[in-house]
Every structure is written in structure tokens, then in C-alpha cells.
Image: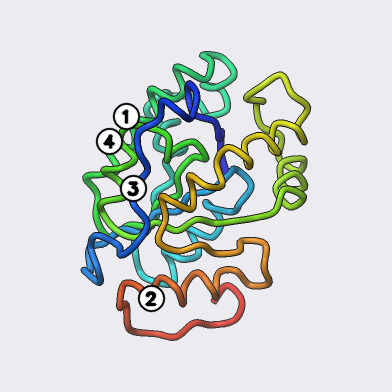
Amino acid sequence: MNPSSASGPASGAPEPAPRGEAPFGNAPDANVVLIGLRGAGKSTLGLQLAERLGLLFVDTDEMLAERAGRSADAVLSEDGEAAFRVLEDEVLEDVARRRGCVIATGGGAPLLSHFGEVAATGLVVYLEAPLAVLLERARTRPRPPLTDLPLEDEFAQLLHERDAIYRRSSQITIEAHASEPILALERAVRARLGIEGGTCKDGAG
């Protein structure tokens, strides 16, 4: 997915939403909010999930790009991370007003001030992937670096800093590197939100 670090140290971040029951229970207008490091597959799996459940799909990096008139990568590399995070937090404030969506967030979203409002609109799902998988995916689609560290060290540091935050902020964790992760994701979301109609299918259908 997209740029993953928060502006400033994690210690200054707002308290993550508590783990437990989704605030909306099985309400039909609950959102499904996907979190995790870039490369976890939030955009890819999010779009697939939205299609399967008949929900709208929202990608916060695409919304950021629309606001800025440039890609998220361009904003990060040209304006710097602090400016990027300000714009990203404004996007989260907007997203928190939406309902009935699958929302793919940036990797640093749970550290921003308006994430709690987004989390309160539905079910938060952490897409977990091991460092090796994240690195492999990152190398196939290079992104602007967030630190001066080599790519492997940067991802290792982010994963170390963020994993516990992602877990505290979510109600469900899905292994995004497993075989057919969309099946596990769909089943878990349907079960937690009480969504009926249709069945999980193998593949992308």
C-alpha cells in the first residue's frame, strides 16, 4: 500500500481504538477498515472484498492524490512526510463521515488524530504479513523512502514499531500472505458483521 510512517514519534500518537467488538456490530452501514504496513495488500484485498460484499471501495491514498492534484508518492517526496501526514489526516476526517465502505488506509493511519473516528464507524482489520513478504512486494513497486535506512532496515523498524499498534487498533487479524487471503478476510468480515447473502468463492469471483 502506501507511505507508512507517521509524522513524529509513535509515543505522541493518539491512543489506538480499543480491540474488541466493532462499534457498529452487524449494522448494514458499518465500514470495514483495513490497516497494515504498505505491501500488506490493503488496496488489492480491499477492492476484492468490496466487490464480494457489494460495498463501495475507498482508498485513502487515492483520495489524498485527488486533493493534492498529485500522486501520494509525489506529495511525500516533494513536500515531505510532515506535510503528507497533515493531508492524510484531513482525508481520514472526511472518510469518517462515510458509511457502507471498505476503506484501505495508509500504513501510518492508526497513528493519526482522526483514525479513531474512522475506526468507530465499523470493523478494523489488520492485514498482517511477515517482513520477507513485505520486502518482496516493496521491491516490485518502489516507493519514496521514509528514512535514510536501507529498505530492509526501514521495514524492520516500522514493523517493530507498528505491529502492536495495529493489533490494538483492530478487531480481526488476517494473514495477508496466506493462500487465498480474500477467502479468510471475507469469511471473517461476514461472520463479525452478520452479513448474509452469497457464499465465499475460490479465486476472485
Above or below 130: residue 65: above
Label whose residue precedes the other's in the sequence (2 or 3):
3
- How far apart are labels 2 and 1 at the CA level? 30 Å
Q: Dot 4: few (<14), some (14–19), or many (≥20) neighbours within 10 Å?
A: some
Residue 17's disc is 3
Tell whether 162 sits left or right of 155.
Answer: left
Kindly identify the amino acid type of the residue bearing the numbered disc 3.
Ala
Kindly identify the amino acid type of the residue bearing the numbered disc 2.
Arg
Q: Residue at x 60, y 43 (%)?
A: 38
Residue 93's disc is 4
**Secondary element at tag 2:** helix
Q: Residue at x 77, y 36 (%)?
A: 152
Above or below 53: residue 201: below
Q: Which residue is drawn at 37% across and 43% down?
A: 16
- How far apart are labels 3 and 1 at the CA level? 18 Å
Kindly identify the amino acid type of the residue bearing the numbered disc 4.
Glu
Residue 190's disc is 2
